[in-house]
Image (cartoon, coloured by chain):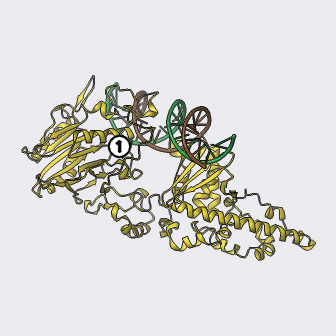
Chain colours: A yellow, B brown, C green
Amino acid sequence: MAARRVMASSDIIPPLFDKSRKEIVNSSTIGIDFLGNALSNDLIYEGTRLKWCNDLDSLKAFVAEVLDLNGKWCSPGGGSKRFTSSNAELTLTWYSGKQNTLLFQGKDGNLIRDGCVKFCQTRDGVMKSSCKQVQALSKNSELQRDLIAPNILESEPTSISRPANQVDVASQQRISKPQIPEQSNYKQSASPFAAPMNNNNSKINKNTLMNKNNRNGHRNNGHHNNSGLNQCKSQNVSLQPFISVPVNNGDPESVPFYDTNRDLQNKALQINQIANMPEKQPISDWIGSLPLIEIPIQAKNNQHINRNTSNKLPFPKRHRTKPPSYRTGHRHQSLEWLSHLDIVYQLCKRLKIAHLNIRSLKSNTHLTQLRDLARRENFDILTISETWLNTSVSSAEVRIDGYNLFRLDRLNKRGGGVCTYVRKELKSSVLKSLTFISEENFHQPWINVQCQKFKSLIICVAYRPPDCPLHCFEHTLKPNYMEALVLNKSIVILGDLNCDGLKDNCVEYKIMDRFLNEMNLTQLIKSPTRITDATQSLLDVILVSSKSI
DNA sequence: TGCGCTGGTGGTGTAGTTTC
DNA sequence: GAAACTACACCACCAGCGCA
């Protein structure tokens, strides 16, 4: 693995948000700075349209290198490619084909578009001017032998490693310098947007080579074809610049509690923290390391469901020709299908609480049905395990109107994750000192729920992955439970412990049972939570500290 | 522990629809 | 009519789960 350079603040702070850079964007000198980058020669301003006249790889390189934007590329279809920036309010759409139209949208998109237009106009003006002057100069026989005029003046925008107007510095110095005095700026910085580059533009070479390799290699699909993202990774640019905070898994107190309402106030601090991360620290320790996010839910209409992606079908449309078999024995069924099996709930004397192993909240179908379920059953608290959420999914996307959401995402690998929906009328807060994911991936967010009418209680959503060692009961859950007991409140632990409560002779059951007895916890669920033709199991549990609950 | 199965994810291209 | 946009089918990869 290549050594990673020390993170610098320039990696984190989006250039477009920087005031000084905005001024540069607005200045007319932008084009001159761009001239240093041969990639930008593919950018054309024709009529009222910006166009990109090369392939997608070069456009990606342009966006990453010249515009210095981080983000995600997707292919919405119709030959179009869309880039959504993560460090600017920008969406870029490229319609490849006859027109090669390049569409900038968003606040920063308009700004960048203006800059690109100015660049094109400036570049074309300079090139015209250069043409005339060199034509005149070329009449001078003394100079003719030193010139490689065609390379300069009709510069095919194909030279990646060498700027179009610096084809041969030694031989062209006499000509290019007087005509383009700003050219010297390029030697210091290729672009006002771009990360610092060395003099021979090696960064561009590296990316170009990588892109070529992509083209020549076998077809990249899915996770391997996001070259924009890969480029970011390869260049050690933070993918989640605003939400990355170092995490100390060993110390629960150090788990950051994150309130997105205070994002802006905390950004500078976080940026400094990231910038100071030691070079050798594993990337997983700091990229997107925000295990806990609290979002005050704002009631808005659900805009994440496609207009044609209604919930009429019991399974995602994409599979309608090959629907997921509602075969028995598998846990991937829709919520409707499993609503009578997978949902374990206890109608307490005061609060209606439910737990659900959802196996992906990313699925629109699951999410829609979960919302329907919450609305229909009117739960006060709804706990979810196996959300499979990560930092790519915002809390707003998985909100349920009327509920506050507390989520604890697994970050070091896919899957896992738990979250809790608490009715807004209930005052709820996270017990930060108890909430964390252990090294063995045992999840346990602890939430205090209070209500004037109801007796307050503590909710814990426990999720033990199948590969999580059984000693986590003793080493991970027990200490936190003991600490929660000190608060002298009723405690409810809901979740998927992956211990079959029906197999009282297996070791998992014995260990869990011993833990329950020792902690004086009562398991309320007695009937199987998953039933197939061949098997029955009781994996989802509700444990209470007091039988009076 | 390894294998097979499965759904999620995100890529591609095609075709249809809407907008200007 | 072209551009812009959307929906869809198909494909490959990945990770989790069940099972032998």
Question: Residue C3: x percent and y percent?
Answer: 64, 47
Vertical side of A81 occupied by A275: above or below: below
Q: Give whichever of A284, A530 is nearer the camera.
A: A530
Name the residue at 29% across, 57% down: A296
The reply, left or right, for residue A434 in relation to residue A236 is: left
The C terminus of chain A: image quadrant: top left
Amino acid type shown at disc 1: Leu
Q: Is residue A295 visible?
A: yes
Pointer 1 chain: A
Residue ID for mark 1: A361
Q: Give whichever of A326, A310 is nearer the camera.
A: A310
Q: Is residue A442 visible?
A: no
The reply, left or right, for residue A120 in relation to residue A296 is: right
**How many numbered markers are drawn?**
1
Disc 1, SS: loop
> Image quadrant of residue A276?
bottom left
